[in-house]
Image (cartoon, rainbow, N blue to C red):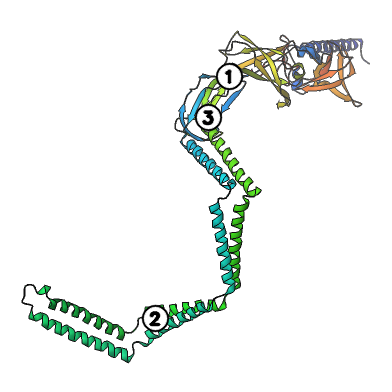
Amino acid sequence: MFSAKRWLLLLLLLVGLGGGGYFFLHNTQIFAQEGAGNTAVDAAAEGSALSAISIQPVSAAFDEVSASGHIALVNQLVVAPEVSGKVQAISVEVGDEVIAGDLLLTLDTVELERALKRAELTVEAQRNALAQLTEAASAAELAVAQANLAEAEQNLADVQAGPSDAEIAAARSSVASAWAKYNELQAGPSQAELTQLSADRKKAEIALAEAQRAYDKVAWRNDVGMTSEAAALQDATIDNEKAQAAYEVSVAAANNSEVQSAISSAQSAQAQLDDLLNSPTAAAIAQAEAQVADAQAALADLQQGPTATELRSTEISLEQALVDLEEAHANLAAAKIYAPAAGTVLAIDTGLGARVSAGSAIVTLADTAELELTIDVAELDVPQVAIGQPVQIEIDALTGKTLQGEVTAIAPSSDSTSGVIYYPVTIRLTDDELANVRPGMTAVATIRNTQVALSDGWLVPTTAIAQVDGQSVVTVVDGENTRQVRVATGAVQGEWTVVQSQELAAGDQVQGTLASFTNENTGRFGPPGGGPPGGGPRGQ
């Protein structure tokens, strides 16, 4: 049994432990309440027990949407040539202000002018072709066509009739003559011919000797060259040479080329005779009939004029030539490149003498007074943003100056970074004076006094939500007691989830954990994974 002194010591120890427990629980609740403002429970980061964390109304978290981005031009207009060519002149410089219709560049036109001339000549040729096709045939043209037809018909009749007896006889005579000549070459001269040629040669030699003796008798005279004796000597010399040559030719054997030529002539004459004897052939008759058909068609074309198909084909050729001519004119005009709209020249991507291709970017224009800013808005904030909503914009480089703008676009699809879902929102700057604002500057946009679509919702730590019997519940801390409250869950942003419940009220605390801190003074919250979403300039 314990003594009275021991019971007293045990009682004091229990009282001390109870007081310490109360002190720990009390301070834990206070610390958790302050977690809605200045702190979060370190135990959450270390995986320790759940803590009491104050819930936040959605409206408090979404009183404004603020994020950063970079100033950009609303539109940039890229100017490209419609034709290829060499840059002949550049009429603007980077930074120049232009209006619609101002000349920017000029291309060399030599090739374009040649193309235009070719197109004009093609049109002229096609017009002439159409005129000739539609023009009625003249009497002379008809007469020529009729004569050609008559000639073709006569030729057909001659072919069908075959060769005459006279033609065959002449062909036979040619064959006989050709073979006779060949035989003479092969046989050489006869004895009688040799005797005659030898006698002629001897006679010429005697005559030459007599003429020489007569000439010698008068050779002493100064005018001997003018005497009859001199003339007679010359004639006798020529006759002797002729007789000598005739004899030598007759006794010489025929050479191979002469023999081959004689054979070829004989064979050709024989082939002509064979053709006549085998005439008319089917091929010859068909050829003659084709010539008649061609002549008939040519005459009919002249008499009837062009067919509808021929006429339309020629008209199409002319129309195509006219289209090409129109295109050539347009290409020549396109050598001068004008500003399509007013703006500032941002870039010139070519130089004098450079060759540019059709469709390639050569000049970039933009209206530098039309500026915009794109920011990333968290998914919980997006329902509070609307097209046309006013925006205040602060630019880092322009300290103390606030510009005005309005929401012009909200992206239909989302992006995500580190698990945080956001939507790009575009804001147009609406101030009249934007002289010092430049594309690329960093700016912070704040959308204030937005209408809260989820005004009856609450933000609770995602870790505070549990599943009980298929229902989502949170555990509300009420002093030393706790109670479970059913909730309907909504969107999740980082460590926080939007819930709705009629049993939750301002000041309630739920059991959960957080990994980072919140800022009570500004009503804005830290990066994803910390306090409730909805604020803080992004990218700061």
The image shows residue 297, relative to residue 61, as above or below, that is below
Q: For the image shown, how many numbered marks are present on the structure?
A: 3
- From the viewer's perspective, is the residue at label 2 or at label 3 nearer? 2
The image shows residue 130, relative to residue 527, as above or below, that is below
Residue at 62% over, 55% down: 300
Describe the element under mark 3 as helix, strand or loop.
Answer: loop
State the quadrant of the C terminus: top right
Measured in 3D between alpha carbons, the distance from the residue under mark 2 to the one under mark 1, in whole angstroms, is 99 Å
**Dividing the picture into quarters, in which one does residue 539 lie?**
top right
Q: 323 or 138, which is in the foreground?
A: 138
**Dividing the picture into quarters, in which one does residue 391 lie?**
top right
Identify the mark at residue 362; answer none if there is no mark: 3
Left or right of 245 in this view: 82? right
Q: Which residue is mark 2?
A: 259
Identify the mark at residue 367; answer none if there is no mark: 1
Q: Position of residue 461 (x, y in %)?
A: 80, 19
Q: Residues within 10 Å of mark 2 (few under 14, many from 20)?
A: some
Mark 3 vs mark 1: which is more N-terminal?
A: 3
Describe the element under mark 1 as helix, strand or loop.
Answer: loop
Residue at 62% over, 46% down: 311
Identify the mark at residue 355; answer none if there is no mark: none
Q: What's the amino acid at mark 3?
A: Ile
